[in-house]
């Protein structure tokens, strides 16, 4: 794909439009990336490195990173236990990149203990794991979870910091960045609604621009498939699910391993734990998350997640204490819509050509481990570059 000259070309830093007071007069780009989560910003950064002559614009409805999207609430747990067969090299490349390529993203090697109620291949007595990782004492009951395995290479990091580093890196490498703007997909480009806030705190469209684009990368997370259907009339098989991450205020330290039991992950963070519940299925179209009830009292954790927590209280005793924050309403428990590639819970991140010049980029539940590799693969495809760094 041939590039065009002008600001944002090879060797020049890009521009940032953060609010409507900054005039935006551009009419065309070679590539427009819609969405500044980690998938979109990583794709933009890799594309600037692989094809620096292409003019590229990143459009984001909020800020960098968007504090309401799935990226900012992603667990940030890299583990080989989540890697589908045949994709080990991609995952290893992602781990190395997280450790070395994006500055301070709080990358920390931290073993993950995967605990089970029954024996299985590679599993050892959980009492042996407690002897090796005494910081896990009191977090689980070895009698209820007598077996487990350990991922020695597991690590934790901050996905939001990765998105910020990739976005800033892309701009430094020549990409332009348009914030507080809602993008609608159109044939041959995008329509941009630049947003502002009124004195009554309403978000309104300040001005609208039509922008031509040779390639549009739809990296809008769980909203991407809906945008493809609503704006372009293209049906996809992808789904979404609403995931909440309750807080567990049981103390943790840098020596505390990450735990996983019954699909629930206990991720040490900020001196306690972030709970990452399993996703059982896609949520139906039109579903609105609501809180459940615990001993007849309304709480902020949705019913499906609450059932998972109750089911595991005997195996993970801290869940049955006041250390568990369940809130009083949905607003009390952090949550976000998560894309489900192909509508499947265990599907890895993917990119898909929707039509000529339009690509959908999705992260989903395994984005922590494989997301960056999939973003690179799409960047390589758009740039026409053969070979991948993990090959």
Image (cartoon, helix red, strand yellow):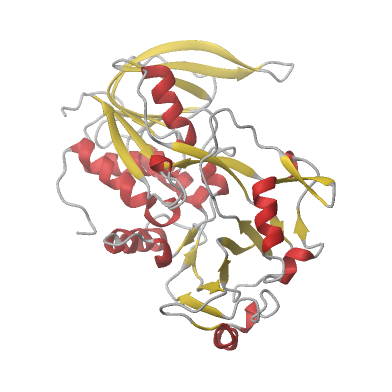
User: Which residue shows up at 31% across the image and 61% down it?
Assistant: 93
Q: Is residue 291 above or below residue 280?
A: above
| Res 360 quadrant in image | top left
Name the quadrant of the C terminus. Answer: bottom left
Residue 173 or 191: which is nearer the viewer? 191
> Residue 187 appears at what percent x and percent y?
31, 15
281 left or right, relative to 10 = right
> Residue 230 appears at what percent x and percent y?
44, 19
Residue 7 or 39: which is nearer the viewer? 39
222 left or right, relative to 352 = right
> Residue 84 appears at what percent x and percent y?
34, 59
Pick out the residue farthest to the front: 118
Specify whether residue 219 is in view.
yes
115 left or right, relative to 291 = left
Specify whether residue 16 is in view.
no
| Res 139 quadrant in image | bottom right
User: Which residue shows up at 37% across the image and 47% down it?
Assistant: 349
| Res 231 quadrant in image | top left
Residue 72 or 279: which is nearer the viewer? 279
> Residue 42 appears at what percent x and percent y?
37, 44
Q: Is residue 15 above or below residue 335?
A: above
Question: How many numbered circles are shown?
Answer: 0
């Amino acid at each position: 794909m041939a590039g065009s000259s002008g600001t944002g070309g090879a060797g020049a830093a890009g521009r940032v439009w953060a609010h409507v007071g900054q005039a935006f007069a551009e009419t065309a780009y070679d590539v427009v990336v819609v969405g500044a989560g980690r998938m979109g910003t990583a794709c933009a950064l890799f594309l600037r490195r692989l094809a620096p002559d292409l003019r590229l614009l990143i459009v984001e409805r909020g800020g960098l990173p968007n504090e309401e999207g799935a990226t900012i609430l992603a667990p940030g747990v890299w583990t080989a236990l989540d890697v589908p067969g045949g994709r080990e090299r991609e995952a290893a490349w992602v781990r190395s990149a997280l450790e070395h390529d994006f500055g301070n993203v709080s990358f920390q090697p931290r073993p993950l203990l995967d605990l089970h109620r029954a024996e299985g291949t590679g599993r050892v007595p959980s009492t042996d794991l407690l002897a090796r990782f005494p910081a896990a004492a009191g977090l689980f009951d070895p009698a209820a979870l007598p077996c487990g395995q350990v991922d020695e290479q597991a690590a934790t990091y901050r996905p939001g910091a990765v998105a910020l580093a990739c976005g800033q890196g892309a701009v430094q490498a020549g990409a332009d960045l348009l914030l507080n703007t809602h993008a609608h997909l159109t044939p041959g480009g995008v329509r941009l609604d630049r947003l502002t806030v009124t004195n009554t705190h309403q978000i309104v469209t300040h001005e609208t621009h039509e922008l031509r684009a040779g390639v549009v990368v739809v990296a809008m997370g769980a909203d991407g498939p809906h945008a493809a259907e609503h704006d372009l009339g293209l049906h996809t098989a992808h789904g979404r699910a609403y995931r909440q991450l309750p807080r567990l205020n049981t103390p943790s330290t840098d020596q505390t391993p990450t735990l996983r039991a019954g699909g629930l992950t206990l991720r040490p963070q900020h001196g306690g734990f972030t709970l990452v519940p399993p996703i059982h299925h896609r949520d139906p179209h039109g579903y609105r998350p609501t809180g459940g009830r615990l001993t007849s009292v309304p709480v902020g954790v949705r019913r499906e997640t609450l059932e998972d927590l109750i089911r595991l209280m005997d195996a993970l005793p801290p869940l049955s204490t006041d250390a568990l924050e369940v809130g009083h309403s949905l607003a009390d428990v952090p949550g976000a819509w998560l894309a489900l590639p192909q509508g499947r819970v265990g599907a890895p991140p993917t990119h898909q050509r929707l039509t000529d010049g339009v690509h959908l980029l999705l992260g989903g539940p395994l984005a922590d481990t494989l997301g960056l590799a999939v973003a690179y693969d799409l960047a390589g495809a758009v740039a026409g570059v053969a070979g991948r760094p993990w090959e």
